[in-house]
Amino acid sequence: MERRLLLAKELLNPDDSVLIVTIDEKEYLRLGMLLEQVFPEARIQMITSVISVQGSTRVGMFSRADEYLYFVFLGDAEVAKVADDMLNETSNYSEKSQLWFQYIRGGKAGKATRREDSKNLFFPLFVDPETGRLVSVGDPVPLGVSRYSVHVPEGTVPVWPLFDDGGEGRWRTGVEIARRWHGKGLLRLGRSKKTESGWSAMSVRSGTEERIDRGEIAVIGRRDDGSAILEERSGANVRSPKTVWNRVSHNAGWHGTKIINQIMPDRSFPFPKALFAVEDALRFVVANKPDATIVDFFSGSGTTAHAVMRLNKQDGGRRRSISITNNEVSADEQKKLRAAGLRPGDPEWERWGICDYITKPRIQAAITGRTPNGDPIKGDYKFTDEFPMADGFEENVEFFTLTYESPMRVQSHREFARIAPLLWLRAGSQGRRIEALPDGWDVAETYGVIDDIDKTDAFVAAMVANPEARIAFIVTDEDRFFEAIANALPEEVEVVRLYDSYLRNFEIDAMRGVR
């Protein structure tokens, strides 16, 4: 643990960052002392979180129902105020702070949810399929009239209140309210892989509209589709979360193990954390940081990356999640594999490792909305943002395998492809990745690399012509060549020298700083 914390300290921004560590009751005292030793300059708080009301039996002792979270605050980092204090059920976050809901009444056919139960609540929403913008709200369709007979404006597709099985349902409100909410940006559409139209509708509730009118909730902007971006105003029904969290959404069995089973029905992982618990823990420190980078260097089943996807979807953020794990095979599985004559490194051995068997498939399934077998994921996400898990997320992901490489081979350009992902990550993980330098240089969307000094003029011209390229990696051992290229580049471009400094800057030394 000390080695990991020392590495984390090098990654954390001393001016504004947060470290979150979870632990059970057996080790929390030692961990607390270790954190104070490694981070003497930090503000440290410990949270008690109920993760299982059923409790976990300890023979002859109290039944364990909680775990502990240490928050280590560096620099100006602080906890965002929210609408839930995390302790009192009367201020349940899932009820008070949730601002967007499925517009269809009920998730499946039932009492008062069908078209015939409310004849004026069955009408189309016309959406532009290219932009996702809600164009107009149609008129109610009388009972007995087929929805297929309704005129559809050119350039739009109709979105109807339909159940997963295709049955006709009803919306939550009438046409007048729907049109008013459309005008205010309080009705929006999102892509769905489960609906007939390919779209699903989300809306606020009447109470939310009233809070907007009272100024308790602010419209701080508009999404590309014209819908409102909402935010609780500071001091308006918001508060600091308490140090004891007691939320149904944090139950590790219901919202950890069960979600894993839904995403990967044929695979299991011992004691995964509740997705919504991790989501809340992150929200409190990155709510006001839509471009934050979250690093999980012991990612396990990939819950942190999954939680970051949900946070981005909720507020349109572009937070990046970097998940790191080994590909360790469980002890029981190792016995079986060794008995079969297999050893670490064999493909048949590695496929059962935690990364290849759990972490990667879970992250990929969360984004695509499909299980590793290709089936749509069953069930819905709950609480802060409710939508079908099969809808997936508008995210991208890259998987890398870290290897040990000889610096001499890298310096001689025989292994450039090995470090290419590191350069792309360093440049922001966006756009095309430079995989090779056949012409001695290349410039992608956000960065450029040059290793042939004779091509300096062309490289500088390409960097100048691309204002989005903010980092230049220069491969040279000559100080004067490096300085000449650096001086020719625009001032806003960050210049990084390869290889004599870059490899040392990014080498991993777990014992660094250990006395």
Image (cartoon, rainbow, N blue to C red):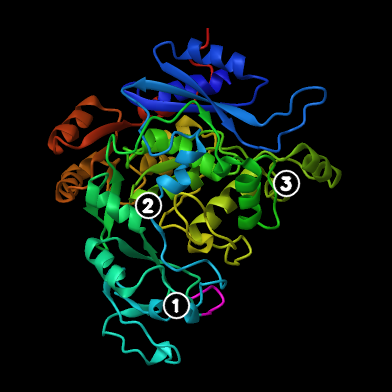
**Magenta stretch holds residue 303:** no
Foreground residue among 248 and 129: 248
Q: Amino acid at mark 3?
A: Trp
**Magenta stretch holds residue 164:** yes
Residue 461 appears left or right of 178: left
Residue 486 appears left or right of 149: left
- Residue annotated with mark 1: 118
Going from N to C along the chain, the mark reached first, 1 or 2, is 2
Residue 231 appears left or right of 341: left
Foreground residue among 36 and 274: 274
Q: Which residues are magenta?
A: 161-167
Going from N to C along the chain, the mark reached first, 3 or 2, is 2
Binning the other alpha carbons within 10 Å of mark 1 as few (below 14), some (14 to 19) or many (20 upward) gives: some
Which label number is shown at residue 349?
3
- Residue annotated with mark 2: 99
Element on which disc 1 rests: loop
- Determine contact: label 3, label 2, CB under 8 Å: no
Going from N to C along the chain, the mark reached first, 1 or 3, is 1
> Label 1, label 2: how many angstroms apart (C-alpha)?
25 Å
Above-or-below relation of 325 to 514: below
Query: Residue placed at 40% from the left, 16% from the top?
Result: 42
